[in-house]
Image (cartoon, rainbow, N blue to C red):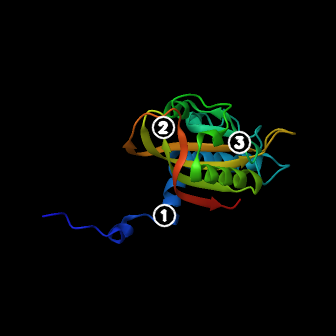
């Protein structure tokens, strides 16, 4: 006797709505702390009430969760460089990606999504909360939840994005890869107006 086929709609009641998920994530640990520090840094900069500057949102301020922080320089639509990568991120990725173009670590539809998200965060600007799957060089495929916030860099510097990346569930193990693939599958993208 075979198992009955389960209807996916039967499980839809167990999936959190986008609002429930967003609230749960943004009120938990490091996500709530980064958001609070970002808002506080906005208040500190009297000249710019929209975005905090790199001088008000410092590494020292983010030190409790710095290991899961990355900072991007948005140089152009095709060049978005990791300016800084926290130690836990580098460990998950299998190497330190500081100085690398994030788009070189994405491919297919995932690359297009990464490109659009980072452009919108840096140019609009808006905040985004994203849940997605990375395929790591070790063969592990795992979910990641990222909160990305725009910050104002020094004068004449490209727009910057500070992002907190927390590991989610491991979904599978496949063969080893030559490099990490970021955003292989995107589960949710939630935009938050500033």
Q: Earlier in the sequence, mark 3 or mark 1?
A: 1
Q: Residue at x 71, y 59 (%)?
A: 194
Q: Which residue is mark 1?
A: 20
Q: Is residue 27 visible?
A: no
Give x and y (percent) for residue 128.
63, 55
* Element type where label 1 sits in the image: helix
Q: Earlier in the sequence, mark 2 or mark 3?
A: 3
Q: Residues within 10 Å of mark 3 (few under 14, many from 20)?
A: many
User: From what the image shows, is residue 57 above or below residue 43?
Assistant: above
* Element type where label 3 sits in the image: strand
Q: Is residue 107 visible?
A: yes
The answer to whether residue 59 is left or right of residue 129 is right
Image disc number at residue 136: 2
Give x and y (percent) for residue 29.
51, 46
Q: Residues within 10 Å of mark 1 (few under 14, many from 20)?
A: few
For marks 1 and 2, give the one nearer the viewer.
2
Q: Which residue is mark 3?
A: 80
Marks 1 & 2, CB-CB < 8 Å contact = no
């Amino acid at each position: 006797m075979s198992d009955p086929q389960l209807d996916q709609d039967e499980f839809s009641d167990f999936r959190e709505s986008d609002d429930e998920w967003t609230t749960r994530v943004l009120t938990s640990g490091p996500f709530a702390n980064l958001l609070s520090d970002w808002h506080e840094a906005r208040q500190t900069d009297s000249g710019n009430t929209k975005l905090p500057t790199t001088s008000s949102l410092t590494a020292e301020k983010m030190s409790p969760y710095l290991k899961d922080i990355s900072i991007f320089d948005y140089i152009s639509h095709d060049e978005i460089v990791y300016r800084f990568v926290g130690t836990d991120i580098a460990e998950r990725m299998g190497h330190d990606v500081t100085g690398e173009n994030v788009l070189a670590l994405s491919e297919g539809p995932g690359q297009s999504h990464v490109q659009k998200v980072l452009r919108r965060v840096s140019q609009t600007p808006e905040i985004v909360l994203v849940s997605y799957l990375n395929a790591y060089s070790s063969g592990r495929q795992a979910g990641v939840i990222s909160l990305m916030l725009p910050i104002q860099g020094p004068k004449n510097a490209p727009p910057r994005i500070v992002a907190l990346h927390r590991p989610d569930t491991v979904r599978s193990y496949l063969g080893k890869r030559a490099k990490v693939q970021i955003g292989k599958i995107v589960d949710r993208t939630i935009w938050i107006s500033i």
